[in-house]
Image (spheres, helix red, strand yellow):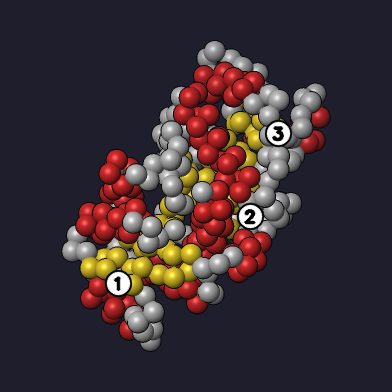
Amino acid sequence: MQHLTDLFGVADRLPRSRLVVAAAQDPASLDAALEAHQRGWIDLTLVGDTQKIRELLSSKDISPDPFCLIEAGTLEEAAARSISQISAGKGDILLKGLVDTGILLKALLNKEAGLRRSALLSHLMLYEVPGWKKIVGMSDGGMNLAPDLEKKKAILDNALEAMEKLGYESVRVAVLAAKEKPDPAMPATEDAAKLAEMYKGSRHIVEGPLALDLALSKEAAQAKGFTSQVAGEPDLLLVSAIEVGNVLGKAFTYLAHAQSAGIILGAAIPVLVVSRSDSSVSKLYSIALGKILAASERSHH
């Protein structure tokens, strides 16, 4: 994939999905959901303070009639009612509105909801960096704080599964660390080497440990005499801890002016947690990504 707008083309061709917005009285999330509805991608269920939701719609001269509005007095109630819609088969994608991420995920992981699907929930971002030749994914800079080897494998499995659903036959993965040789003083390098070993013989190419310069530059790899199938061509950067992903992602966004799409993986449905600082187009990319993954999920079950 070279451009995030490629997601729009795919979303346009798929049948409509139902998007459930938890605590939809959030102008930013509501705007993105309304644009996706206008494009014909989704039907909308808006859960939350229905009076405020109606006021927001009215301020945009939009009638509430095409949407399903569900009243929820508190943020906890909004999360629970949104999840129960999805558990009942009345929603394909979940979008976080004004509710805290922690409250939403607690409702999602409630055993009675039955929506947990993989060993771990993890976050995947896709970045379109100006001047770079293709989309690059990154995981996990949003959820898991300091994952051990087992959790890193679960994070990588979630990301690979999502990228396969996007049409990647073989994903080139750089498992990032500060240097290329395993070193007991730097546990991330040892984990990276073990992860690379685990995926030997799979259809995906997983290399690690790789410093970021080698991951992004064939020339840097050649200068260091490092033989690599991933150098200069990564589809996915796997980070060792949340700080690394957080810093790298914000550097892409604020220094390199990247556009992005983000999603939480590992549940039975795609979960979209958009940040208030995300641009409206970034939120729309995330909804398109969620729609594509939801359609693939339905076709597999």
Residue 239 at what x, y percent from top left? 54, 34
Hey, what amino acid is under mark 1? Leu
Above-or-below relation of 115 to 71: above
Callout 3 secondary element: loop
Residues at circles 2 and 3 in contact by the CB criterion of under 8 Å? no
Above-or-below relation of 258 to 247: below
CA distance for labels 2 and 3: 24 Å
Residue 106 at what x, y percent from top left? 29, 44
Residues at circles 1 and 3 in contact by the CB criterion of under 8 Å? no
Write down the residue under mark 1: 69
Write down the residue under mark 2: 128
Question: Which residue is nearer to you in this view: 239 or 11?
Answer: 11
For disc 2, the neighbor class at 10 Å (few under 14, some 14 to 19, many from 20) is: many
Residue 276 at what x, y percent from top left? 40, 60
Q: Quadrant of residue 109?
A: top left
CA distance for labels 1 and 2: 35 Å
Please state if 264 lies on the left or on the right of 205 as rendered. left
Callout 2 secondary element: strand
Which of the marked residues, 1 or 3, is nearer the chain's N terminus? 1
Residue 76 at what x, y percent from top left? 22, 54
For disc 3, the neighbor class at 10 Å (few under 14, some 14 to 19, many from 20) is: few
Question: Which residue is nearer to you in this view: 129 or 233?
Answer: 233
Hey, what amino acid is under mark 2? Glu
Question: Which residue is nearer to you in this view: 138 or 79?
Answer: 79
Which residue appears at 27% of the width and 44% of the height?
Answer: 112
Residues at circles 1 and 2 in contact by the CB criterion of under 8 Å? no
For disc 1, the neighbor class at 10 Å (few under 14, some 14 to 19, many from 20) is: many
Badge nearest the viewer, 1 or 2: 1
* The residue positioned farthest toward the left in the image shown: 73
Write down the residue under mark 3: 203
